[in-house]
Image (spheres, grey):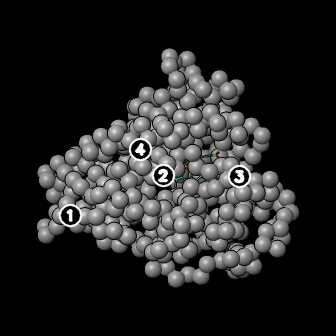
Amino acid sequence: MNTAPVNTGLKDLRTEKSPEGQCPYLVLRDPETVREVLHRPADFSPANALVAATPLSGQALRVLQRARFALPPVLASNDTGSHAGIRKVVAGYFTPATVAAIEPRIRQLARESAAQAVEQLNSSGRVDLVQAVAAFPPAVIMLELLGLPVRDLVRLKCWSIDSLELFWGCPDEARQLELAHSAADFYRWLRELVLESVDAPGRNLFKSLAGHGLSTPEICSMGYFLLIAGQETTTQLISTSLFRLVQGSGIVTWDEAAAEAGARAAVRHVLATESSVPTWRRVAVQDTLLGGELVPAGAEILLELTGNHGSSAGRIPRDSGQPSGAPGQGSSAYTLAFGSGIHRCLGAKLAELEAAVVVQETAAALPGIRLQDQTPGWIRLLSFQAPRTVTISHRGR
Ligand code: HEM
């Protein structure tokens, strides 16, 4: 259990920022303060939401430039008046009715993946649940909901993880170059998909955005964000949920997670304590007061959205493999996992449903298993986290 003190005000944050001079952010942890920042978009802009946490080298930037890589603000980092209209277009693809209607399809994919995991376990004695059940169903569902072709899923998953590391990790120059090549490949692939989709028959998101007046670079920017955020974050939520359950440190047992209520509780607990998106950024637009303290214009702010109070406050955390959240986190912590206010996550309902269904079907299909690898590597980035593998075997073998 995490016993680190929870910050309630800016004094604490500044103390935290200063000693080693390593953290460029004002880190806010108190849920009410985090919520206040999210609800004051005129003072705290999301313009830095997609800025690389580690400045990119000239070489890496040139690789991106050659691919005409650009992320003009459209949605998550858009602090202008165009945000509301664009959000409405995207929200039309994730309405509550659409999400409810897609549940049988999610369950079908989850059952198929779980059945393959059983087969692999029986034939080779072990199976990695991240690859077997967590990786692909969210990607298939997202593409289907957006009206886009379901293809190149393996590449999409690799590109997603690489781009998250490029923008939210601390890669050295050599690694930046590798990651920039991957991001450039992804962007070229995306531009082709955008050009193909705006002329395709039927309804798809890219066509709707073109109809709303967005340029090709703006649609690519949206695609780059959404094709990653709309599925990799859910894969990571499923991965952590499964890991904690098999480890025996979930809020319910593995057997209880085989029922709908147990799976939902397990997923919500992970959202509250160690969500796949533990932090998100804002920047102060002007000198402004928060909790009676002055936040200077230009101050970069890191908001903690989950009960990850033991993380290293704005520095990229190290792998711990230990549960980082506090059991029994309050509901305010849970509700912040998807942000709040005018930029609140448009996929919250979908992500939670997908995660609960995949966890439930996996636990139901795989009774009597144990964690084979107790200390897997973790993705630990500024704003993303999950175990890279969840390898299980039969109990007693
Ligand atoms: C576990 C999975 C997910 C988590 C933890 C998560 C979390 C977040 C967070 C923290 C934000 C920023 C909110 C803010 O600034 O107030 C966000 C924004 C967003 N998310 Fe998610 N997300 C997840 C899955 C998804 C999925 C599945 C989709 C779509 C299918 C999605 C679409 C979006 C969009 C479009 C935005 C930007 C909204 C705007 O700026 O108006 N997310 N998400």
| Separation of residues labelled 4 and 2 (CA atoms) | 9 Å
Amino acid type of the residue that numbered disc 4 sits on in the rendered structure: Pro
The numbered disc on residue 293 is none
| Separation of residues labelled 1 and 3 (CA atoms) | 43 Å
Q: Which residue occupies 49% across, 68% down?
A: 273
Amino acid type of the residue that numbered disc 1 sits on in the rendered structure: Ile
- Are there few (<14), some (14-19), or many (20+) residues within 10 Å of tag 4? many
Q: Which residue is mark 2?
A: 233
- Report helix, strand or loop for mark 4: helix
Label 2 beta carbon within 8 A of ligand 1: yes
Is residue 177 visible to us here? Answer: no
| Separation of residues labelled 4 and 1 (CA atoms) | 24 Å
Q: Which residue is mark 4?
A: 138
Query: Are the two marked residues, 3 and 4, in contact with CB atoms closer than 8 angstroms?
Result: no
Nearest the eye: 194 or 205:
205
Nearest the eye: 226 or 163:
226
Looking at marks 3 and 4 on the same chain, the residue that comes earlier in the sequence is marked by: 3
Amino acid type of the residue that numbered disc 2 sits on in the rendered structure: Thr
- Are there few (<14), some (14-19), or many (20+) residues within 10 Å of tag 3? many
